[in-house]
Structures are given as structure tokens and as C-alpha cells.
Image: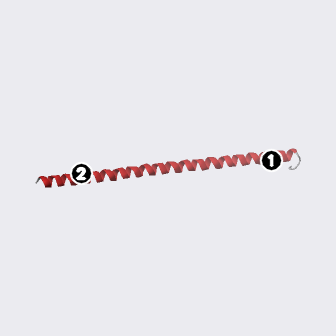
Amino acid sequence: MASKGLQDLKQQVEGTAQEAVSAAGAAAQQVVDQATEAGQKAMDQLAKTTQETIDKTASQASDTFSGIGKKFGLLK
């Protein structure tokens, strides 16, 4: 009888432990997913900012070159 009770208790403990491991795994996966999403958003923002900077720099360079060309009579 006592053996049956201990066996049942052992199965309950093993089941609870397995559920805890499963829940921890799911929580860890959620953290990984959130970190991945945050990293992707950061990379997207970096790419956008970099492209805006490149565009602005190119425009300023074009304006400067145009001004130099006009000053020396190369452009009208």
C-alpha cells in the first residue's frame, strides 16, 4: 500500500517537473523571440538612418560641386 502511494507521488512529482521544464522552455523561447524582434527593429532603424544620412550627404556634395562649378564658370 505504502509502495503504491510512493509510486503515485513519484509520478506526480515527475509530471510537475516536466510541466515546469516545458513552461521554462516556452518562456525562454518567448524571450528569444522578443530579443530577435527588438534586434530586427534596431537594424531596420539603423538602415533607415544610414540611408537618410547618405542621401543628405550626397545632396550636400552635389550642391557644393554645383556651387564650385558655377564659381569657376564650369556650369551655368
Q: Which residue is drawn at 58% across and 47% down?
A: 45
The answer to which of 67 and 4 lies nearer the viewer is: 4
Q: Indicate the quadrant containing the N terminus: top left, top right, bottom left or bottom right.
A: bottom left
Q: How many marks?
A: 2
Write the residue at 14% across / 54% down: 3
Amino acid residing under circle 1: Phe
Colouring convention used in this rendered image of the protein:
secondary structure
Q: Which percent across, then down, holds residue 23?
A: 34, 51
> In this figure, which residue is indicated by the disc labeled 1?
65
> Circle 2 sits on which residue?
13
The spot of residue 9 in percent (x, y) is: 19, 51
Which type of secondary structure does the marked residue at label 1 adopt? helix
Q: Residue furthest right?
A: 73
Q: Residues within 10 Å of mark 1 (few under 14, many from 20)?
A: few
Would residue 72 appear left or right of 54 to someone viewing this image?
Answer: right
The residue shown at (88%, 46%) is 72
Q: Earlier in the sequence, mark 2 or mark 1?
A: 2
Secondary structure found at label 2:
helix
Residue at the location (31% across, 50% down)? 20
The three-letter amino acid code for the residue at tag 2 is: Val
Q: How crowded is mark 2: few (under 14 residues within 10 Å), some or many (20 or more)?
A: few
Residue closer to the observer: 2 or 15: 2
User: Mark on residue 54?
Assistant: none
Marks 2 and 1, Cα distance to the nearest angstrom?
77 Å
Q: Do the residues labelled 2 and 1 touch (CB within 8 Å)?
A: no
Residue 19 x, y percent position in the rendering: 30, 52
Residue sitting farthest toward the left: 1
Mark closer to the observer (2, 1): 2
Q: Where is residue 47 in the image (x, y as percent from the top left)?
A: 60, 50
Compared across the picture, whether 24 is left or right of 59 comes to: left
Could you tell whether 34 is left or right of 52 in the image?
Answer: left
